[in-house]
Amino acid sequence: MKKTIIFCISIAAGLAVIQSCSKSGTPGKTGTGGTDFDRKGLLTNMSANIILPAYTSFQASASALNDAVVAFNTAPNTTTLAAAQTAFTAAYKQWQSTSEFDFGPASQANFRVNINTYPTDVNQIAANINSNTYNPDLLANLAAKGLPAIDYLLFGAGADNAAIVALYTTDAKAANRKTYLATLSAEVKTRATAILDSWNGSYKATFLAADGTDVGSSLGQLVNQLVYDYEIVKNYEIGIPAGTQSMGTPFPQKVQAYYSKISLQLTLLHLQAIENLYEGKSLQGDGLGLDDYLVKVNAKYSDGKPLNDVIKAQFAAAEAKLQALTDPLSANIQNNNTDVAAAYTELQKLTVLLKTDMTSSLGILITFGDNDGD
Amino acid sequence: MKRINIYLAASIAVLVSAAGCKKNDSKPAPAYTVPTTYNFSNANFADATTRIGMLTEIQTVEKAATTGVVDGAKAKNMFTNTGSPFVTAAYNTSGIQLKDQGAALYQTDALRFIDSLVAVSQSGKVASRGVAGVGASSANAATKYALTANGMNYAQIFNKTSMGGLITYQIVNIMSAVSAGGLDNNTQVNGATALEHSWDIAFGYWGVPIDFPTNKTGAKLWGSYSTQVDSGFHANKILMDAFLKGRAAITAKDSKTFQAQATIILQTMERLTGAAALQEVKEVKESINDNIARNSRLSECYGFIYSLKYNPKKVITDAQIDNLLALFPKNFYDLTLDQLNAIRDAVAAQYNFQDVKDIL
């Protein structure tokens, strides 16, 4: 611990001198604090084995979803609907390990909110279908597009599958509805393809080159987005529906995938994806991750235990509490909110570890603000 | 631990800058030290603190807009300190007010903004595109905002323009007078010269504790925003160093140094406004799929940019400000990402924040 303090002070002193004396600091070199962790190796592992495979899979699943929607629109019946629903579920599952990388090309395109803004705005969807006009660029349409809107259109628009099919066949607005569904699934595919192309193009090299720990570095952005995405799990998937931000009043309809009722499955996949990114784990094995970095800088928790051990234990604790719940999560929130709140509490503990302890140990600044409600 | 770091960093910076200025002094340098906190024995900025408190009380009155009708008459009485409107009794008897300290345009704008907010608060409807009223954040139903039919939150526009039309206006006027050498630094009134007292008032308007930024407790308005943008624009340190160094130089009659610090503060206040506008762009992005909260934050951004008009020594021209404001959609509900990025890029270019435009 003493070593850490001296190390931090020297960073602070170093920064102070650089800020006051020269503008030509070498970002990427400051903040290494004399450790020789292979950050380039970490970035290589994450981009080649985790990020690119995630984008590739998501693009493929979005493409398959679009194909299934086209097939459904061509011949709307319960068989083609079921096929579209299956394709949707696959795409939504894959999204859980894709949403964490909202920096670089994804950030430029506002990828995450374009794909997954929920709760979806059923009124706005109805208005867009009725008017048969839709401007994908309006931010006001974010809650009427993407996977959550498709979730509603394929699973929730009618009481059962036969009723849903009727909305695309005999309903007065059937033609408009088909057009809208097709527009949304095509947009998801187009956006997924654009991000994948950017990564396969020049961005991968850009990502590998920015190998420092400053605010604009790849690691800085990746850690910020890992924490931000983690807070989406904690707040949007669990907390807000359970009522943690509304003085206990639950909003079960605000869960992710409310209509397809796979919320909990998705949350478990999402949490696993974040843990995998933290550990640098992929189908290729356990590569360099943030866990290795924390071990390398000998980061300790306040009780003296290695920080990495504490973080891993907390991932397990949060997952265990989530495993105790069942889908549909919205029903759990209505009938068993105590257990949902218990899961939220464990998730909250992990937030502090990731957002405060991990980032300060790695010398990475969190640059997104809290929603302070002002 | 953070405290130690900041303290250390601050003291190093003082040493560095002190060493730097020695070289430039041609005449024998008066011997004086620059303290690390604003604890000058004859410092008095109570009037500035009182006015910030008055502004806070107006904001409290305005908060009623999300639950009922705003008492506009009361807010306006607070603006002119008429009829003992304040909860804090000492403000009522202070003999000072907000209005006469503001830029001329701000004095009329502020009343207009209060009227607009009152009108929204009288609607009794749920806010949506084309409908003035109160709306809730989609993420957090407990967080509510009063928006016009065009999505503007006039409580925030009032807040941000007050920071410009009142606080920045005062600080810039004082610094401008200091660098012009127009303030008496010889005659003592109530234990301080006119120059010392004016400088103290400017510091008080910044709204930070005397041991800032080591201690950030109670930092208000610009004191809060200089911290919020600090990751990309180190305004905390720039301003604190300049206020400390300038004040020590004033007492030591080192005019060259205090005039230089006045120029730094004057210029920083304008740049800080640009940084704050970019900070709001970032907040808009953080609530990008939340129509109501996004509009409120866009209103904050709009307010900061508009407030540049009040700065008597601004570098940006009125035409350039109008060009920036023209980048906003007429109806905030119609905002697109491209428009938001255009606002960001134009402000960043104006104030040379291109490298940090996304992290402020």
Image (cartoon, coloured by chain):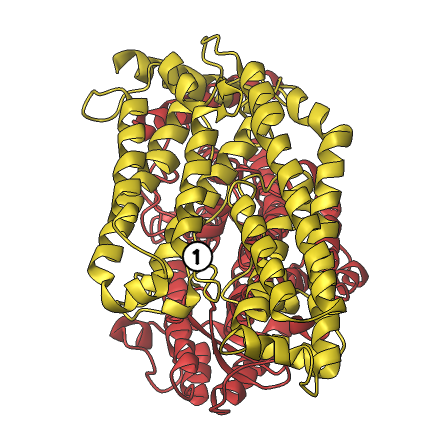
The residue lying at 48 percent from left, 40 percent from top is B236
Q: At which x and y percent is residue B54?
A: 38, 70
Q: Mark 1 — residue?
A: A262
Q: At which x and y percent is residue A15?
A: 50, 21
Please state the total of marks drawn on the protein image.
1
State the quadrant of the C terminus of chain A: bottom left
- Residue furthest out toward the front: A79
Q: Colour of chain A?
A: yellow
From the viewer's perspective, is residue A354 above or below residue A41?
below
Q: At which x and y percent is residue A160?
A: 50, 75
From the viewer's perspective, is residue A29 above or below residue B2?
above
The residue lying at 74 percent from left, 64 percent from top is A183
Does residue B19 appear to the left or right of A300 in the view shown? Answer: right
The residue lying at 52 percent from left, 72 percent from top is A156
**Residue A90 visible in image:** yes
State the quadrant of the N terminus of chain A: top left
Relative depth, front residue between A359 and B60: A359
Corner quadrant of residue A12: top left
Q: At which x and y percent is residue B284?
A: 58, 58
Relative depth, front residue between B218 and A91: A91
Q: Residues within 10 Å of mark 1 (few under 14, many from 20)?
A: many
- Residue type at mark 1 is Ile
Secondary element type, mark 1 = loop
Corner quadrant of residue B169: bottom right
Q: The red chain is which one?
A: B
Does residue B67 appear to the left or right of A283 in the view shown? Answer: left
Relative depth, front residue between B32 and A144: A144
Corner quadrant of residue B53: bottom left
The residue lying at 64 percent from left, 84 percent from top is B130
From the viewer's perspective, is residue A312 above or below residue B266?
above
Q: Give the chain of mark 1.
A: A
